[in-house]
Amino acid sequence: MGLFSSRLSPGQMAPLCRQLATSYDAGIPVLQSLELVGRGAPSRKVRLMLRRMHTAIRNGATLSDAARAESDLLPEFFVEVLAAGEVGGRLDVMLQDLARYYEDEQVMRRSIISSMVYPAFQLAAAWFLGSFALGIVTRMHERGFSIGLYFKQYALFQAASMFTLFVLFWVMVALARVGVFQYVTGFIKDYIWPIRPITRRYALARFFRGMALLIGAGLNMTECMKRSAALTMNPLMERDLLKGLPVVMNGGSLVEAFEKSRTLSDVGRQMLLVGEQSGNLEASLQKVADWHFDEARAATRVALTVMGVLILLILAALVGFILVMFYSRLYSGILPE
């Protein structure tokens, strides 16, 4: 999202969902709600999108169909949950939950960005000061060394480096926009620590939250499983979760369906068992969804801590290398051969 995607960011989706949910709860028809929200939207892109959705619904499309037509702007998760809300007759609940989901995601992104400010500053300082010091150390004993000339060469080197970084960044943005990186990011999400536990916990939280809402909406269990598995946004996890679909179709329980699943956590299995035995499956699923969201936040904090430690180790190694280079050059120039 943002620069690397044409889709709306969580910061744009959160107020959009909240405004739609508030309007719908107030009894305002969907068409009028889209019109009201569109008028107050700060982004021209959002205003045009809502206008197109308004026109599509007026011409006979459902809200989910109109949203699906804007899939280049609207996240897939939003479209799937919206469609489930319409099918189950709980569009008001789904809109409120979408608003909470994107608000939580926005809070999480802000905390990650704020946590990355200090490590980013450290890396920038390591690059500029480290490259400057290494240049000084390697050239200080050269004949005709001039500090003024070195400053000029260093400035040209940094300008070339920043230009190269700028070009690489926009090449990456262009490749991401056309979907080239989706396989790379998919591999990282599925296999690389510490990203893997974060993305899997968020995916499970979406799965259980979707199951809770769809079951509460009155959908049959097979439809709940299909739509909830799609909400993970992870093909490998979705395929694993849907392996238990035949069991449910033949009258089996969710506990039996997910017995051999490698995706579900132990807590998820236990809460499914409690929910089915107590007859309050919706509440149990919502609780385990909240638990996975908390676990995802904790995993994010761990990842940021590990990243901070790695950056400090890199800085320590760089400082040590500079010191070794400096004293070796110093003593090689002082001591007789």
Image (cartoon, helix red, strand yellow):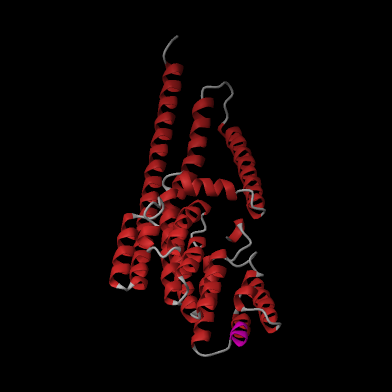
- The segment highlighted magenta reads 30-34
In this rendering, the answer to whether 106 lies above or below 90 is: above
Residue 63 on image: x %, y %? 61, 78
Residue 232 in the image, given as x and y percentages of width and height: 48, 59
Task: Tell me: 337 left or right of 256.
Answer: right
Q: Residue at x 48, y 37 (%)?
A: 130
Asked if residue 323 lies in the magenta stretch, the reply is no
Give the residue at the far front of this rendering: 250
| Prevailing SS of the magenta stretch | helix
The quarter of the displayed image where residue 58 is located:
bottom right
Residue positioned 40% across, 56% down in the render: 201
Residue at x 36%, y 49% (from the top left corner): 305
Please state which of residues 86 and 159 is positioned toward the viewer in this rendering.
Answer: 86
Which x, y percent locates residue 94? 48, 76
The quadrant of the picture occupied by the C terminus is top left
Figure check: 318 above or below 207: above
Instruction: Give above or below for 57 relative to 72.
Output: below
Q: Verify whether residue 31 appears in magenta.
A: yes
Q: Position of residue 22 (x, y in %)?
A: 49, 84
Is residue 301 at all visible to an observer of this figure? yes
